[in-house]
Image (cartoon, rainbow, N blue to C red):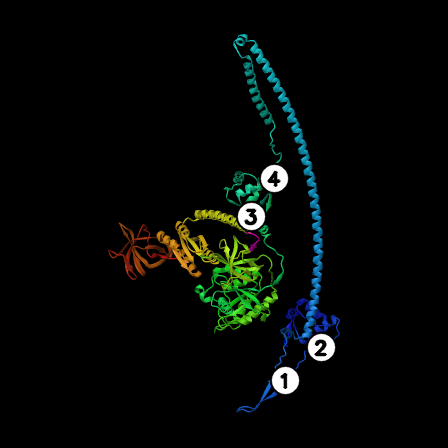
């Protein structure tokens, strides 16, 4: 039997390697470490020690005995007496018996009894550990309960004190009201008495005046009525004066009292807040906040978003208390009613992501496993979306996620690594480790998920699996054969060699992970991909991670919400419920959301809408802040370099993942001289509004796996908008790179075409100094610029004014011929100088 390591034996018997080393030391096997190997004798000693420690009699344990089984045979005769073939036929029956040993017995070299005793010892230890853990949790629960009771008693005490204080304040206010009412009643009574006295005095005065006029009294036939008429006038005046007295009396004491001290509020400040919301939380007008901002040197409008630091300064400046709140905290409060952590954990199937460099055979491997032809249907033979599929392996269902390998899809690969339990790294044996291979390793490590390396294309002649192992070992991915912890499996996705071993490795790794998830709780998942379907609306591919997603559930995914109208599996069949580790296509979302966002099943439509609207507000504020910063950067950049060119692009794709990849890849093409601006991007077909926007911004429309509808095509023809359709991402990048290269200013290069040596200098009354020269290299042309060199140093650069051969003006003089050269505006030419003739050439530049 082959020797095994201590770590391997510990994994088989279900205990830790450190504990097994200690038990070996107690059994007399010293000098062993985790990576040390154990012989048959060492294992026998360990078993004897374990038997003694459990109180059993010591037995003479030797190496496992061998036994030989012989098949039993039975011979019978069959007699036939009728027909032509009368006689007897001998029949021999052999009973086939198989003596099988389990994998654990073969690996450890122990018998079934010895292995069972070792497992019982490990289980006893595990039970003891669990018992201690339960006691510790019970004690902690008791302490927390006492603390809660103490806090509740303090809360009740403080509530009682507050109630007494409130009652006392109410009695004081009532007493003040009674005193004020008495004072008002006394004042009213005194005023009424005074008014009555004034009225009597006026009556007496009027009667006296009437008595003093006897002539009028005689002529008057109805004196009583006149007296009554005199009495009515003061009554009306009395009423008016009474009203005025009451109004003046009420003006002396107003019901509103000015606060004696400033009211201070606790203002919650998130990571981003607009000016109007900040003013509302401080109970002031927005103009006051804008004044404070202007005092701080910031010009702001009522709808402008402020960052958290600026908002803190404004709140403190206005005398209120700051309470910092992060967006995560606010979102956690909203999701507190949605997420339920309690639930029975049951085993679930693993989620496996296939990653690797482009064209290394990831989709072909998945094709062989699924027995389908997905790769043949992909544009350009490369995967440009995340695909999720389920395959039955043993007793469980394994979910495979296929990610793109092209450099532009970095975000997709990172997203695939975050939602998986296990990563299959596919490396071509004839190509080795490539840039996206290293990137996939980094994503797997960042996500903290185990990895299995599948060395593909072993059927090709140039396959070098050892080279792959060496290159991966350089980035700390060491095979198990070399003492590492990563499984390497040689496969061929074309012929299927090694694929069964790869599936067994996946099953083994999944058993070690012990994957579980609650089922009877509201569903939680993640959006793998989303798109807009013309007939069905927004369609999202969702991988359920916890709980059960059912038909009719209200869900929220990022900024979108809705109700599950229909669900389909990877084969297009309708499903009623989706359990953990199951990918489904969901209909019913309000819009196509971003890939990678979490999905929650909400208890009601109102709750789902509330969470989605909160996220929309935060996204809009972040977008406005980004636009504001972009405007400032654009203004500064225009001041610094006013001659830079910009190519505007409008992108429409079929799914969100491709839109994200295209935006990142095209934006990275920008340089200091030429810039690329993505004016808009979306999912779905090209419509009239997209054409209008492209025409207004002079943008190029890029349609990736999408087309323009009939009305949009007519508008494109009428307005002359440039539209390009693509189905492969690197074609988009190459064409846009060429378009940006056309915006670059050409590069000017100088090329020397001729050299002439000055032999003599002549004086001309019209042209000044004329150099008699011999052309030694190339040619001299009249319309080209020249340089005058003395001792190989440039002393003048200018233009040819005249070029003559003998007495004739010529346009060009070739090598080996004499000529006369007149240099424009320069007369200091001497014997021995050199005249260098050159031309300037424009060279087209590329990015």
Q: Which mark is residue 61?
A: 2
Task: Verify CB contact (< 8 Å) between mark 4 and mark 1.
Answer: no
Indicate which disc, 3 or 4, sits on the residue closer to the N terminus. Answer: 4
- Real-space CA distance between mark 3 and mark 4, rounded to the nearest whole angstrom: 22 Å
Q: Nearer the viewer, mark 1 or mark 2?
A: 1
Q: x and y percent of residue 619 in the render?
A: 51, 50
Q: Quadrant of the N terminus?
A: bottom right
- Real-space CA distance between mark 3 and mark 2, rounded to the nearest whole angstrom: 71 Å
Left or right of 637: which side holds 100? right
Q: Which mark is residue 271?
A: 3
Left or right of 831: which side holds 487? right
Indicate which disc, 3 or 1, sits on the residue closer to the N terminus. Answer: 1
Indicate which disc, 4 or 2, sits on the residue closer to the N terminus. Answer: 2
Residue 168: quadrant of the picture: top right
- Real-space CA distance between mark 4 and mark 1, rounded to the nearest whole angstrom: 99 Å
With respect to residue 501, does 821 lie above or below? above
- Describe the element under mark 4 as helix, strand or loop: loop
Between 16 and 27, the one lying in front of the other is 16
Residue 27 visible, this angle: no
Between 215 and 678, the one lying in front of the other is 215
Which range of residues does the magenta coloring cover? 600-605
Crowd tier of the residue under label 4, counting other residues whose Cα lies within 10 Å: few below 14, some 14–19, many 20 or above = few
Q: Quadrant of the C terminus?
A: bottom left
- Describe the element under mark 1 as helix, strand or loop: loop
- Describe the element under mark 2 as helix, strand or loop: loop
Q: Which mark is residue 72?
A: 1
């Amino acid at each position: 039997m082959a020797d095994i390591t201590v770590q391997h034996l510990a994994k088989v018997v279900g205990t830790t390697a450190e504990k097994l080393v200690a038990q070996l030391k107690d059994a007399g096997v010293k000098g062993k470490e985790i990576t040390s190997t154990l012989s048959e004798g060492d294992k026998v000693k360990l078993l004897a020690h374990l038997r003694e420690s459990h109180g059993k009699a010591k037995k003479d344990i030797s190496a496992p005995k061998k036994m030989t089984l012989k098949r039993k045979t039975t011979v019978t005769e069959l007699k036939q007496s009728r027909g032509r073939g009368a006689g007897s036929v001998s029949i021999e029956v052999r009973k086939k018996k198989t003596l099988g040993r389990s994998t654990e017995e073969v690996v450890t070299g122990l018998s079934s009894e010895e292995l069972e005793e070792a497992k019982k010892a490990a289980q006893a230890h595990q039970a003891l550990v669990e018992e201690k853990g339960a006691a510790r949790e019970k004690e902690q629960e008791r302490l927390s309960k006492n603390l809660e009771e103490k806090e509740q008693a303090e809360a009740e005490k403080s509530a009682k004190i507050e109630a007494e204080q409130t009652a006392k304040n109410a009695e004081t206010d009532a007493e003040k009201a009674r005193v004020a009412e008495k004072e008002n009643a006394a004042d009213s009574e005194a005023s009424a008495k005074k008014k009555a006295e004034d009225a009597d005095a006026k009556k007496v005065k009027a009667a006296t005046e009437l008595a003093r006029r006897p002539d009028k009294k005689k002529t008057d036939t109805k004196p009583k009525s006149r007296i009554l008429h005199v009495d009515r006038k003061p009554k009306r005046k009395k009423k008016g004066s009474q009203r005025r007295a009451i109004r003046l009396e009420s003006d002396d004491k107003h019901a509103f009292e000015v606060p004696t001290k400033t009211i201070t509020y606790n203002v919650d400040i998130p990571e981003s807040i607009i000016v109007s919301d900040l003013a509302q939380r401080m109970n002031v007008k927005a103009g006051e906040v804008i004044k404070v901002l202007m005092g701080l040197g910031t010009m702001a409008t009522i709808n402008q978003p402020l960052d958290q630091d600026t908002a803190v300064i404004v709140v403190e400046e206005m005398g209120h208390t700051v309470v910092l709140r992060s967006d995560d905290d606010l979102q956690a409060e909203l999701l507190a009613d949605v997420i339920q952590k309690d639930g029975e954990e049951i085993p679930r199937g693993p989620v496996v992501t296939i990653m690797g460099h482009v064209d290394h055979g990831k989709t072909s491997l998945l094709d062989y496993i699924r027995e389908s032809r997905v790769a043949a249907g992909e544009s350009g033979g490369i995967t440009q979306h995340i695909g999720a599929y389920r395959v039955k392996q043993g007793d469980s269902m394994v979910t495979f996620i296929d990610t793109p390998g092209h450099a532009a899809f970095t975000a997709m690969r990172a997203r695939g690594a975050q939602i998986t339990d296990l990563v299959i790294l596919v490396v071509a044996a004839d190509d080795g480790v490539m840039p996206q291979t290293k990137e996939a390793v980094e994503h797997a490590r960042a996500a903290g998920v185990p990895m299995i390396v599948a060395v593909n294309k072993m059927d090709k002649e140039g396959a070098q699996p050892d080279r792959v192992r060496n290159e991966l070992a350089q980035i700390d991915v060491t095979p198990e054969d070399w003492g590492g912890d990563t499984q390497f499996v040689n496969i061929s996705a074309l012929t299927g060699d090694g694929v069964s071993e790869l599936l067994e490795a996946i099953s083994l790794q999944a058993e070690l992970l012990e994957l579980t998830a609650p089922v009877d709780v509201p569903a939680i998942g993640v959006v793998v991909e989303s798109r807009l379907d013309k007939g069905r609306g927004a369609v999202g591919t969702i991988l359920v991670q916890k709980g059960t997603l059912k038909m009719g559930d209200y869900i929220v995914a990022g900024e979108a919400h809705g109700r599950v109208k229909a669900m389909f599996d990877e084969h297009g069949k309708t499903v009623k419920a989706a359990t953990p580790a199951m990918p489904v296509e969901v209909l019913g979302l309000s819009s196509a959301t971003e890939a990678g966002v979490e999905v929650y099943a909400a208890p009601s439509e109102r709750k789902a809408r509330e969470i989605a609207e909160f996220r929309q507000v935060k996204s809009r504020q972040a977008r406005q802040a980004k636009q504001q910063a972009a405007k400032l950067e654009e203004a500064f950049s225009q001041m610094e370099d006013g001659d830079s060119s910009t190519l505007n692009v409008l992108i429409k794709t079929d799914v969100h993942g491709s839109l994200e990849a295209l935006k990142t890849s095209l934006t990275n093409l920008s340089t200091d001289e030429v810039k690329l601006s993505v004016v808009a991007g979306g999912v779905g077909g090209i419509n009239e509004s997209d054409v209008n926007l492209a025409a207004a911004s002079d943008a190029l429309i890029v349609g990736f796996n999408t087309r323009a509808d009939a009305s949009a095509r007519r508008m494109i023809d009428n307005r002359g908008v440039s539209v390009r359709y693509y189905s492969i991402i690197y074609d988009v990048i190459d064409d846009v790179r060429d378009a940006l290269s056309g915006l670059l200013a050409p590069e000017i290069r100088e090329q020397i075409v001729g050299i002439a040596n000055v032999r003599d200098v002549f004086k001309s009354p019209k042209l000044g100094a004329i150099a008699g020269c011999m052309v030694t290299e190339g040619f001299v042309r009249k319309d080209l610029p020249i340089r005058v060199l003395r001792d190989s140093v440039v002393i003048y650069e200018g233009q040819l004014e005249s070029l003559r051969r003998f007495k004739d003006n010529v346009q060009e003089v070739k090598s080996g011929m004499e000529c006369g050269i007149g240099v424009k505006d320069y007369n200091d030419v001497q014997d021995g100088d050199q005249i260098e003739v050159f031309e300037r050439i424009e060279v087209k530049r590329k990015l």
